[in-house]
Amino acid sequence: MSTGLSDLYQEVILDHSRHPRNFGAGESANRQARGNNPLCGDRVTVYLAVDGEHINDARFNARGCAISIASASMMTEMIKGKTVAQAKSLFDRFHTLVASDAGESSEANGDSDEDMTELASLSGVRAFPTRIKCATLAWHAMSAALDGADDGVKTE
């Protein structure tokens, strides 16, 4: 990754962590799930307002590192207005981006859509396996909320 691109990615993460979008409990939420990363102490609760197959609103509360909060902020922005299937597909693509070598090759090939462009800022966690859990915690909670499960998601 070039230095300029690295700086831009770092700035995106810092902006979302310092000024998280959709932070706070959702009044219209009808689904929620909690996530916990016991290794570092990150905690997140994702609140979704789902009507049929559409996600009308997505919000979160979190206590954690910059990566965890930035990832949750980006996620809530991206899943609003999407269908449940689209949100789950986005989760799968994001997980591949940050957690596998396949994410590295698709990023290098430019195989990216508009949503994945901003999420690429989190791809650097791939080099730090324990930080992958920080980046994906909110996403696992979102997936659990979509499935109607609120028994608490753990990264372990």
Image (cartoon, rainbow, N blue to C red):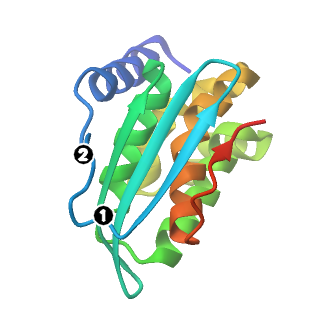
Q: Is residue 101 above or below residue 150?
A: above
Which residue is at 60% across, 65% downward?
149
Mark 2 residue element: loop
Circle 2 Cα neighbour tier, 10 Å, few/some/many (<14 / 14–19 / ≥20): some
Residue placed under numbered mark 1 in the picture: 80
Q: Is residue 20 left or right of residue 37?
A: left
Mark before the other along the chain sequence, 1 or 2:
2
Which residue is at 78% across, 36% downward?
156
x and y percentages locating residue 49 in the rendered image: 31, 69
Q: Is residue 147 above or below residue 21?
A: below
The residue nearer to you, when weighing 125 against 46, is 46
Mark 1 residue element: loop
Which residue is at 35% across, 40% downward?
73
Q: Three-letter amino acid code at disc 2?
A: Asn
Front of the two marks 1 and 2 = 2
Identity of the residue furthest to the front in this view: 151
Q: Are dots 1 and 2 in contact, CB under 8 Å?
A: yes
Q: What's the distance in space between the residues labelled 1 and 2, CA to CA?
A: 10 Å
x and y percentages locating residue 128 in the rendered image: 71, 19
Residue 112 visible in rendering: no
Q: Three-letter amino acid code at disc 1?
A: Lys
Residue 10 visible in rendering: yes
Number of numbered discs on residues: 2
Q: Quadrant of the N terminus?
A: top right
x and y percentages locating residue 72 in the rendered image: 42, 41
Residue placed under numbered mark 2 in the picture: 22
Q: Is residue 127 above or below residue 50?
A: above
In terms of image quadrants, where is residue 107?
Answer: top right
Circle 1 Cα neighbour tier, 10 Å, few/some/many (<14 / 14–19 / ≥20): some
x and y percentages locating residue 69 in the rendered image: 41, 30
The residue nearer to you, when weighing 10 against 28, is 28
